[in-house]
Image (cartoon, helix red, strand yellow):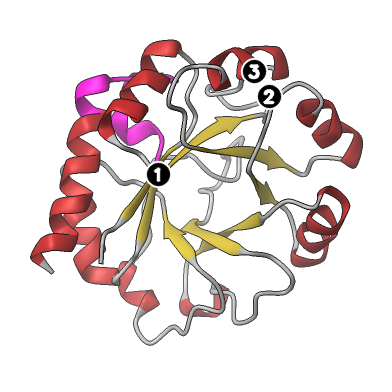
Amino acid sequence: MTVRVKICGITTEAGMDAAVAAGADWVGLNFFPASPRFVSPARAAELAARPGVPTLVGLFVKATDDEIAAVLAQVRLDVLQVYDDAARAAAIRARFARPVWRAVGVATAADLPRAADGVDGFVIEAKAPPGATRPGGNAVSFEWSVLAGWQAPAPWLLAGGLGPENVAAAIRATGAAAVDVASGVEREKGIKDPALVAAFVQAARGAAIAA
């Protein structure tokens, strides 16, 4: 099994080019204004035009149909990653006819999704800590042991607090077939470090080979 990798929250040409050079399977563009990784639709279109860009994932938090449509009018997105409840995520999929991944914050096994509920995949990460201004991308992990015995109802990515130094251990502990990173490959908030991007992808793929 080759672990698949998503580099999320790209804001610069150098960051996009680093993800492409490292062989990332997906790149994420963040359309949540409260995030330090926010990009406007126009900026996203510029980044999406870089050569070799892989599957593009757009991240939306409690977005309206009009807000999503405004982004799609300017930039090609292959997947919509949404922070919303199950019913709303399914409605977004029906409205825009694109694959939808629902982000799910986890603290205990009871938080894990047990049914696909009309979406194509899940991003499994830690619940936002108290006082957080955004539901994900907070550089915190959860107890990976809560995933033991979970029968995933759809493909999923492990996220939250991952970096080059711990992604291999995370993959071995959880059996994750895909991982998602944002702040763990940044040299400063919102700015990707090409060396860290390359190291993260290498570590994730190396863990799969060793498993």
Q: Position of residue 144 (x, y in %)?
A: 32, 68
Question: What quarter of the picture does the C terminus occupy?
Answer: bottom left
Which residue is identified by label 2?
A: 33
**Foreground of the two, 2 or 71:** 2
Labels 2, 1: front one: 1
Q: Position of residue 169 (x, y in %)?
A: 17, 59
Q: Amino acid at mark 2?
A: Pro
Which residue is identified by label 3?
A: 45
Asked if the residues shown at circle 3 and circle 2 are in contact, with their CB atoms under 8 angstroms apart, the answer is no
Which span is picked out in magenta?
A: 181-196
**Rendering quarter of residue 136:** top right
The crowding category of the residue bearing disc 1, from other C-alpha atoms within 10 Å (few below 14, some 14 to 19, many at least 20), is: some
Which residue occupies 26% across, 32% down?
Answer: 22
Check the image and report above or below for 4 versus 107: above
**Foreground of the two, 91 or 97:** 97
Q: Residue furthest right?
A: 66
Label 2 and label 1: CA atoms lie apart by 25 Å
- Residue 79 is left or right of residue 53, and the answer is right
Local SS, label 3: helix
Check the image and report above or below for 128 versus 71: below
Q: Earlier in the sequence, mark 3 or mark 1?
A: 1
Local SS, label 1: loop
Q: Amino acid at mark 1?
A: Asp
Q: Residue furthest left?
A: 210
Q: Amino acid at mark 3?
A: Ala
Which residue occupies 23% across, 39% down?
Answer: 200
Which residue is identified by label 1?
A: 25
Labels 3, 2: front one: 3
Q: Position of residue 3 (x, y in %)?
A: 29, 57
